[in-house]
Amino acid sequence: MNRQQLINHIFKKKSVLCVGLDTDLAKIPKHLLSDEDPAFAFNKAIIDATKEFTVAYKINTAFYEAQGIKGWVSMEKTLNYIPEDIFTIADAKRGDIGNTSEQYAKTFFETYPFDSITIAPYMGSDSVKPFLQFKDKWSIVLGLTSNAGSADFQLQQCGDELLYQKVLKTVASWGTPGNIMFVIGATRKEQLQEVRQLLPEHFFLVPGVGAQGGDVDTVCRNAFNKDAGLLINVSRGVIYADGSTSFAERANEEAKKYQKEMEVFF
């Protein structure tokens, strides 16, 4: 999916909601565990319930990889079930170099045709540039994350700037706003506006809304741009809103609530 297609879809739905499919078999409703493929059964119901309000789905590959071959099958079925006009993210956080990165790119852009993949940039340009060779595919690079340990490196001084600022500017120079996004944590409220000023045109994938304490209003007020420029991810707050047989109905209600909060910014 190219940038203009993504923007068009966002403005059509008046939404920047990304639903995270962090599907944990220990957390899904118990009645689904008797299904032949419980993870896919859960994901299918969530997608059906939320696709009206959602512009992206983020599949956290760790939850599928942990299940071995069955998990990879569930992930592929889930990816194939997502409507074609909805942006897909492989939250795989790959970050190796050279031909290893090339193989990761083929895995998540060809074998499993996601629109994008999350990447850890610690090893430098070698770990990102192989992903940028694919037309209409996106690299979503970790920029400023919302976990407590981010202070160990990201917030450390690096010359006359903080390390995360250097990472954002350097990585942005390797590609364009049409093939690079950045992960910017929603709980970093005081830095959202600063990051937007630093990167006025790039899209940000923003986790941390809902269970982690971030909120839609703060993110949009500080980081929304003329193209929206955001994908706000909510995982637990939507997919695990209810653990009963009514889980899909509650997911629908929560997704609709988030979309209504976002709509006022269009």
Image (cartoon, rainbow, N blue to C red):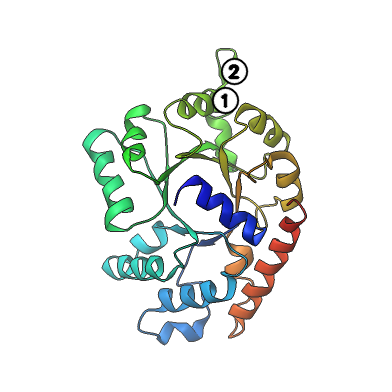
Taking depth in this image into account, of 11 and 65 the one nearest to the observer is 11
Q: Position of residue 129 (x, y in %)?
A: 34, 33
Within-10-Å neighbours for mark 2: few <14, some 14–19, many 20+: few
Relative to 238, is 248 above or below? below
What residue lies at 33% left-to-right and 43% top-to-bottom? 134
What residue lies at 71% left-to-right and 34% top-to-bottom? 193
- Kindly state the secondary structure of the residue where label 2 is placed: strand
Relative to 202, is 239 above or below? below
List the residue tagged with mark 1.
165
Dots 2 and 1: beta carbons under 8 Å? yes
Q: Position of residue 235 (x, y in %)?
A: 57, 61
What residue lies at 31% left-to-right and 36% top-to-bottom? 130
What residue lies at 24% left-to-right and 45% top-to-bottom? 103
Within-10-Å neighbours for mark 1: few <14, some 14–19, many 20+: some
Marks 2 and 1 sit apart, C-alpha to C-alpha, by 6 Å
Residue type marked 2:
Glu
List the residue tagged with mark 2.
161
